[in-house]
Image (spheres, coloured by chain):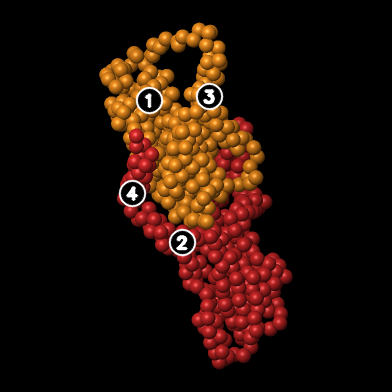
Chain colours: A orange, B red
Amino acid sequence: MQIYLPIAEISVNIFLLLGLGLGVGFLSGMFGVGGGFLMTPLLIFIGVPPAVAVSTGANQIIASSTSGVFPHWKRKTLDLKMGVLLLIGGSSGSIAGVQLFALLRGMGQIDLIISLSYVGFLGIVGGLMMIESVRAIIRAANPDKSGGRRSLRKRGWIDRLPFKMRFPASGLYISVIPPVAIGFFVGTLVAIMGVAGGFIMVPAMIYMLRMPTNVVVGTSLFQILFVTALTTFLQAAQNQTVDILLALLLTVGGVIGAQFGARAGRNVKAEELRALLAALVLAVCLKMGWDLVVTPSDLFTILPRGAGEGF
Amino acid sequence: MIAALLLALGLQGQPQIATEAPGIVAALTQETVEIREDFDGAELVLYGATRGLTIQDEIVVVLRGPGRDLRVMQKSRSFGIWVNSAPLEFDDVPSYYAIATSLPLETIAHPDELERSGIGLQAMLEANARAMEASWLLRASTVVDGAGETNPPAEPGEQAEPPALIRQDRVSEYLDAIARAGRRDDVFAEAQRGVEILDGGLFRATIALPPLTPVGNYVAEVYLFRGGRPIASRSASLRVEKAGIERFFFEFAHDLPVLYGLFCVLMAMIAGYIANLAFNRR
């Protein structure tokens, strides 16, 4: 059954969209990530204009992070103060990102920048995650060999920054600059890549800010919820690239898939799960990298011209 | 459809003032095509009548969609990756262009004649390119060096770059690219046939509208060819518009973007909250 999407202006099979939501939802539930890094490239692949795919991806993440943030709120595994700081950075990053997006689209280079960002970030994060999880698996296999955790190292230069503040929920006393900077960086990515940025936010909170892991996911979801809400709003208001029908169809599949994914994830060891996720991230990275290098089937690109026009 | 036929017949039956003067009339079976949520392409039927149709006469129907301004870029490899470069701009290129004919177009008229009257995809694109040449000359260097660097356009007053800088073969590569992209999406179609000549000087043309049919005002032009030349023509207009939910959301998004943005955010939050109620009860 075909459905015509009003903003994307293409006709797509409704079951394909539901299935896409279900599949990506399953993986995001299993690995505890937003899944935007899979959804946006897949939408582009089925013919949704990149600008619409990125903006609509952000809209769909609002729904998944809303449902994800409630349990954390109830269990109080959420550092509200840290979340607000990340949000301040994230909001400015999102505003800057939407402007940058419009500028690059005007230059005809948005596809390239989206692809390059994907290759770069997914490659780095996937690679680091793979190394870390493989080490963890090896360590788990040989428990006798110095099983003790490495002591928490000092944060180094981060501790020397001014404007320190207390974060009781995380048990931290650090400068406000790193959270705001990380928030800004991830906010920009939300606007340009259509991803929630959890795959960068979570490692940054653990390894750079040294936040306790039990509050990391809740805090990350909290800030992602508001940054994607702002991004969706800005993209809709400025670029008219949010397709509500597409977002709702993906959401329906996504929330159901996430439940099954979360259940499936409980049967797999944490470090093996991380290795699987790293493999998935690297696979998407390699696919996008390959597409940049391989000779395209048509050497010409036809782009629409004129301000305010949809892609 | 019947109304169109009757109209066509009625016009055909008009007193023939100059018996020999050939003429043509046409009407579309629908004046608007609505794109609804289940739109997956449509078939458009055009009826027409001719006056003084002889055995060597042929009919050509051209349906042209709203014009779009395009920027065509050629990918070139730099540092191992493919980057868009060497842009060439085109104004007012039809977003849809279809031809239906009573015989294959190349047997109806000589290419030169088609080019002169601007009929056919190739002729249409070439005419468009000729219209753009003046503006390209101002920034000819951008096109030719192919590096994609935007040199400041020369002042219109001063001596522009020599015209030879826009090589004809390069422009035709760009035109071919536009044609290729249009055919890929089925928005450019040159049917070998599609016009059926019925009895009594009546004819019927069928034209396919693909799933990616652009929205806007269309013009259908009907030509009567005799001896390889168009001797009469008529045009009819068509409007393709979104309807139902499609129209509602499209207009909502474009007319009230701020409210639409808030609506999208709210809908997603409600969906997430419902999901939370459904699955996170514990």
B32 left or right, relative to B202: left
Q: Where is residue A296 in the image (x, y as percent from the top left)?
A: 63, 42
Front-most of residues B134 and B240: B240
Q: Name the residue under label 2.
A: B36
- Distance from label 3 to label 1 (Cα)? 20 Å
Dot 1 surroundings within 10 Å: few (below 14), some, or many (20 or more)? many
Residue flagged by tag 4: what amino acid is it? Phe
Quick one: B135 or B146, which is closer to the camera?
B146
Q: Nearer the viewer, residue B281 or B85?
A: B281
Question: Label 4: how many residues lie within 10 Å, few (<14), some (14-19) or many (20+)?
Answer: some
Chain identifier of the residue bearing label 2 in the image: B
Indicate which disc, 3 or 1, sits on the residue closer to the N terminus: 1
The tag on residue A272 is: 3
Q: Which residue appears at 54% of the width and 62% of the height?
A: B41
Q: In this view, does A127 lie above or below B167?
A: above
Q: Nearer the viewer, residue B98 or B171?
A: B98
Contact (Cβ within 8 Å) of mark 3 with mark 1 = no
Query: Callout 3: few (<14), some (14-19), or many (20+) C-alpha neighbours within 10 Å?
Result: some
- Circle 1: element type: helix
Instruction: Choose the circle earlier in sequence order: 4 or 2.
Output: 2
**Image spot of residue B280 (x, y percent):** 36, 36
Estimate how packed mark 2 is, as few (under 14), some (14 to 19) or many (20 or more) residues with alpha carbons within 10 Å: some
